[in-house]
Image: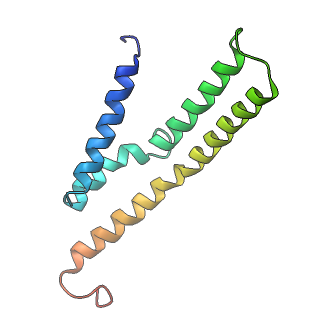
Amino acid sequence: MPPLTPDAVRTATETLSRLTDYLRENPDPEEAFALAEPLLDEYTGLPVQFADTLRALARALQNHPDAPRTLAGDLLINELRTAAWEQADQHSLHGVLDGLRELYGSAAEGGQGCGRCR
């Protein structure tokens, strides 16, 4: 595997930005779900991965031999870890995606009529 670079990470964030722009164009729901699904996977999705990244960053900064040992630094590291837990809590979004998929699948099968009639 090639070494990770800031440019490689920027490419990933640019891809997410392109996805956002695409979703703003009102694509077919089935396609939108397919594109968003990997991001919201319960085990490997973005919330879980980002939480792991934040925890790894906190550990790398705290364990580095040249890291300043100050109360302010410790507080910032703790804030980073708190943010990681908050991100990890978002893993439940995969259930939201499943529910929306079921809802849209049911709506597509229901034919015409208002939502209450279906």
Quarter-of-image position of residue 111: bottom left
Q: Position of residue 87 (x, y in %)?
A: 57, 45
Quarter-of-image position of residue 6: top left
* Residue 88 in the figure: left or right of residue 24: right
- Residue at 26% x, 42% y is 18
Q: Position of residue 44 (x, y in %)?
A: 47, 38
- Residue at 50% x, 41% y is 43
Q: Position of residue 61 (x, y in %)?
A: 65, 20
- Residue at 45% x, 41% y is 46
Q: Nearer the viewer, residue 90 or 25?
A: 25
Q: Nearer the viewer, residue 75 or 1?
A: 75
Say above or below: 109 vs 100. Answer: below
Q: Residue furthest bottom?
A: 117
Instruction: Please tell me how many numbered marks the rendered image carries.
Output: 0
Q: Nearer the viewer, residue 93 or 106?
A: 93
User: Quarter of the image containing the N terminus?
Assistant: top left
Say above or below: 112 vs 62. Answer: below
* Residue 110 in the figure: left or right of residue 70: left
* Residue 28 in the figure: left or right of residue 13: left
User: Quarter of the image containing the C terminus?
Assistant: bottom left
Q: Nearer the viewer, residue 103 or 61?
A: 61
Q: Position of residue 104 (x, y in %)?
A: 30, 69
* Residue 65 in the figure: left or right of residue 56: right
- Residue at 68% x, 42% y is 82
